[in-house]
Amino acid sequence: MKIKVIVSVIVSAVLVLACTVGPIAATLIYESYLTRDLTAEIITRSPEKGNYSPRFLSVPVGEKVKLRIRNVDTVVHGFAIPALQVDAGEIKAGHSVTLEFTPEKIGKYDFYCTVWCSEHHLQMRGVLEVTAQ
Ligand SMILES: [Cu+2]
């Protein structure tokens, strides 16, 4: 009888761990899989809540750039680098978009929000600098 109680306590403890630690570990593993070869992740918020972060990026010319644009705000945002024909379209609140492109020309390229997101929307911008390798 005592052994049955001990076994049921151990089984319960294992199940509780599997239900609590398991999903957290799975989430962390999945997140590291998603970000394994990213050049950068740009957190996206309206300017009064923090703007793009970072707002300046530097990448070498001729190398693949992989950006994840992550909207952590409560409104829709956009992200575009028109001079490089990069456009994420609308990024809903809580969603992410991954963009891949290869800049072929050295220079400084403006990126900005393409969705009217707040009265400070026009300040929602940054610069991607493409440098010599
Ligand atoms: Cu905007």
Image: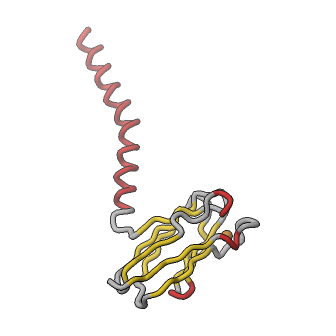
Residue 24's quadrant in the figure? top left
133 versus 40 height, above or below: below
**Which image quadrant: the N terminus?**
top left
- Can you say which quadrant of the picture contains the C terminus? bottom left
> Residue 64, image x and y in percent?
36, 80
Image x and y of residue 39, in percent: 39, 70
Question: On the picture, is 76 further left or further right than 128?
Answer: right
The residue at the point 35 percent across, 45 percent down is 25
Q: Quadrant of residue 87?
A: bottom right
| Location of residue 40 by image quarter | bottom left
Q: Which residue appears farthest toward the right when viewing the image?
A: 119
Residue pictured at 43% horizontal, 90% vertical? 105
Between residues 55 and 93, which one lies in front from this camera angle? 55
Q: In the figure, is residue 48 to the left or right of 20?
A: right
Image quarter for ligand 1: bottom right
Horizontal relation, residue 121 to residue 18: left or right: right
Where is residue 102? Give x, y as percent. 40, 84
- Outermost residue, bottom direction? 105
- The reply, left or right, for residue 50 in relation to residue 128 is right
The colouring scheme, among rainbow, by chain, secondary structure or one colour, is: secondary structure
